[in-house]
């Protein structure tokens, strides 16, 4: 294919995009979206689940894998992970051999948050009030864990769907609080701080202003949050949720902003599910200010959604080959992904058509 004599068009031609939030390039190859697909087809996720599953170790009253029995909870339920990736009781220690073989003990706390006693619900099908309760629990957990002097970062995240490694379909998320700031928030911290030092302004405040003026990547918004497909998105329908007001964490939000966050989560997950009429898999996480005792005026509250689905409920994107060895790459442009998400209704497809349609 030759482009000789034509003018550059980002909708058609391969190009690089800069991600200022983590300081790396992305390769966009929009022409590849037209290629036929004969690769792996995933098994579609089951949309209907029972309200209660006697075999589920997260349902109320059931025994967990470690033998502990859940209470008959009626709202959200938080417990210490039975198989934590981090523990608080390990001794200090490690080694450093010529800066090449470096080990350091890492303490932390891991918890699980069940969103609902209902096995068949999730953030898109729960009521507004129920999702608000989840946000309130997140806020309390951030304050509690962030207040422990030796914990320097609190990561709240959800893996939805078997495709994303979720071990149980019961609606839940995890909270891992670390002794050190993890890699991705640390990279963002460096970039946010550098931009503030160089420009005297917040990177995400400036970026949000640009996105709202152009509007082609904005999916929807309200008085407190803007939901958009970032200019530098790697995953096909990746989304960045940015607070309009500049603050660092859930603890800095007003009551109305937390209600708005709950509404934003519901609206986004419904649009995701409607896109391919499936329980849309994703990894989602809140990026909040570190809890290391230092002031972080550069930090701006935001959430990342990383969904793998590409063309349908059964075709996913893989991060392999060139993407593992060289540079992240995507086919469909962020602008076209945002356009498709904008066109999705905010009534969940399992609820049936609106009367009169």
Image: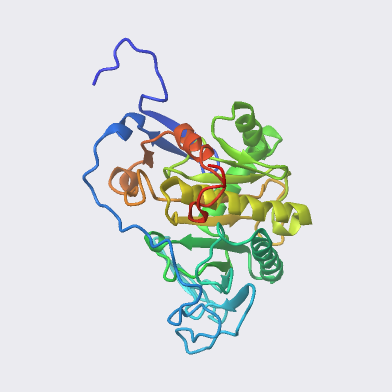
Q: Quadrant of residue 249?
A: bottom right
Residue at 65% across / 58% down in the picture? 290
Q: Is residue 36 left or right of residue 308?
A: left
Q: Is residue 24 left or right of residue 30?
A: right
Q: Residue furthest left?
A: 38
Q: Position of residue 193 (x, y in %)?
A: 64, 44
| Viewer-nearest residue: 272 or 33 | 272
Q: Quadrant of residue 70?
A: bottom right
Q: Is residue 125 left or right of residue 65?
A: right
Residue at 30% across / 49% down in the picture? 320
Above or below: residue 121 compared with residue 351? below
| Viewer-nearest residue: 276 or 77 | 276
| Viewer-nearest residue: 303 or 74 | 74
Q: Quadrant location of the N terminus?
A: top left
Q: Position of residue 32 (x, y in %)?
A: 30, 33
The number of numbered discs placed on residues in the rendered structure image is: 0
| Viewer-nearest residue: 325 or 345 | 345
Q: Position of residue 212 (x, y in %)?
A: 63, 31
Q: Position of residue 90 (x, y in %)?
A: 53, 80
Q: Is residue 295 visible?
A: no
Q: How is the image coloured?
A: rainbow
Q: Quadrant of residue 162?
A: bottom left
Q: Residue furthest top?
A: 5
Above or below: residue 324 compared with residue 28? below
Q: Is residue 24 visible?
A: yes
């Amino acid at each position: 294919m030759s482009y000789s004599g034509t003018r550059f068009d980002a909708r058609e031609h391969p190009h690089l995009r800069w991600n200022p939030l983590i300081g790396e390039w992305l390769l966009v190859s929009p022409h590849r979206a037209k290629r036929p697909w004969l690769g792996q087809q995933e098994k579609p996720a089951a949309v209907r689940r029972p309200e209660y599953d006697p075999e589920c170790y997260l349902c109320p009253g059931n025994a967990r894998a470690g033998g502990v029995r859940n209470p008959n909870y009626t709202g959200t339920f938080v417990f210490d992970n039975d198989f934590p990736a981090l523990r608080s009781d390990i001794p200090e220690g490690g080694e450093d051999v010529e800066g090449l073989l470096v080990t350091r003990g890492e303490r932390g706390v891991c918890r699980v948050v069940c969103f609902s006693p209902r096995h068949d619900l999730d953030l898109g099908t729960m009521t507004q009030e129920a999702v608000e309760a989840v946000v309130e629990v997140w806020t309390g957990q951030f304050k509690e864990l962030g207040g422990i002097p030796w914990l320097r970062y609190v990561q709240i995240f959800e893996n939805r769907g078997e495709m994303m490694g979720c071990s149980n379909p019961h609606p839940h998320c995890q909270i891992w609080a670390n002794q050190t700031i993890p890699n991705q928030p640390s990279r963002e911290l460096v970039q946010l701080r550098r931009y503030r030092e160089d420009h005297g302004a917040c990177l995400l405040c400036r970026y949000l202003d640009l996105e709202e003026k152009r509007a082609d990547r904005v999916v929807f918004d309200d008085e407190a949050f803007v939901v958009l497909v970032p200019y530098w998105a790697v995953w096909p329908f990746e989304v960045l949720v940015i607070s309009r007001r500049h603050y660092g964490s859930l603890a800095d939000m007003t009551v109305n902003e937390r209600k708005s966050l709950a509404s934003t989560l519901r609206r986004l997950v419904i649009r995701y599910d409607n896109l391919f009429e499936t329980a849309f898999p994703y990894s989602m996480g809140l990026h909040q200010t570190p809890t290391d005792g230092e002031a972080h005026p550069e930090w701006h509250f935001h959430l990342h959604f990383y969904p793998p689905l590409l063309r349908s409920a059964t075709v996913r994107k893989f991060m392999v080959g060139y993407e593992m060895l060289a540079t992240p790459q995507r086919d469909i442009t962020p602008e076209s992904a945002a356009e498709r998400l904008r066109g999705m209704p905010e009534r969940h497809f399992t609820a049936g058509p609106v009367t009169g349609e």
